[in-house]
Image: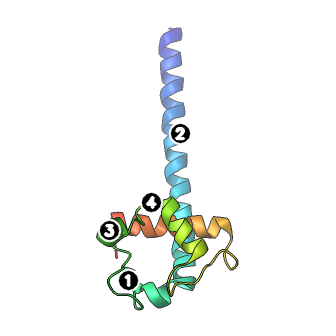
């Protein structure tokens, strides 16, 4: 009986934690979308790049140019490069993380 109870509690905890992680990710993506619209869409609308058209936010280009992880996108947003300004003094760490997760999610889901 203890085994069944332990198994039930373990499964319940696993399901609850998975639900919480998914819910938290959705909140981050929503916040990331807002940051993107307010700060990035002028040059990157629809995942494009109006300044350097060969470097889009589409997964193929993120892979090609080594910007295909959340950490690499965070670095790019914080520090800028080329014509892209650094956003580390304009956006909080949480906002940068949210927008990086949003960009990568959009790319991986072919949502641009």
Crowd around label 3: few <14 · some 14–19 · many ≥20 (10 Å): few
**Marks 3 and 2: which is nearer the front?**
3
Q: Which residue is mark 1?
A: 46
Where 12 sits versus 102, above or below? Answer: above
Q: Residue at x 38, y 75 (%)?
A: 57
Real-space Cα separation, disc 1 to disc 4, in angstroms: 19 Å
Residue at disc 3, secondary structure:
helix
Tally the numbered discs: 4
Q: Which residue is mark 3?
A: 64
Residue found at the far top of this picture: 1
| Image spot of residue 12 (x, y percent) | 51, 31
Quadrant for residue 44, please give it. Answer: bottom left
Spatial separation of the CA atoms under disc 2 and disc 1: 35 Å
Q: Please tell me which residue is depicted at 49% across the width and 51% down the height of the picture.
A: 22
The secondary element bearing badge 2 is classed as: helix
Image point 56% across, 62% down: which residue? Answer: 27
Give the quarter of the figure containing the C terminus. Answer: bottom left
Viewer-proximal residue, 58 or 76? 76
User: Does residue 4 sit above or below 40 in this rendering?
Assistant: above
x and y percentages locating residue 32 in the rendered image: 54, 70
- On residue 16, the disc is 2
> Badge 1 local density, few (<14 within 10 Å), some, or many (20+)?
some
Tell which circle, 4 or 2, labels the residue nearer the N-terminal end.
Answer: 2
Q: Secondary structure at mark 4?
A: loop
Q: Residue 47 occupies which quadrant of the picture? A: bottom left
Secondary structure under tag 1 reads helix
Who is closer to the viewer here, 50 or 45?
50
**Label located before the other in sequence (3 or 2):** 2
**Can I make out residue 30 in this image?**
no
Disc 4 residue crowd, few under 14, some 14–19, many 20+, Cα 10 Å: some
Pair 2/1: label in front: 1
Residue beneath label 4, please?
A: 69
């Amino acid at each position: 009986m203890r085994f069944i109870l332990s198994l039930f509690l373990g499964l319940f905890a696993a399901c609850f934690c998975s639900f919480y992680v998914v819910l938290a990710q959705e909140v981050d993506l929503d916040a990331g979308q807002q940051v993107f619209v307010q700060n990035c869409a002028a040059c990157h609308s629809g995942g494009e790049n109006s300044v350097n058209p060969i470097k889009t936010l589409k997964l193929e280009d993120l892979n090609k140019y080594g910007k295909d992880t959340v950490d690499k996108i965070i670095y790019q947003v914080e520090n800028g490069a080329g014509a892209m300004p650094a956003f580390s003094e304009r956006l909080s760490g949480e906002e940068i993380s949210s927008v990086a997760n949003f960009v990568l999610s959009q790319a991986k889901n072919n949502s641009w």
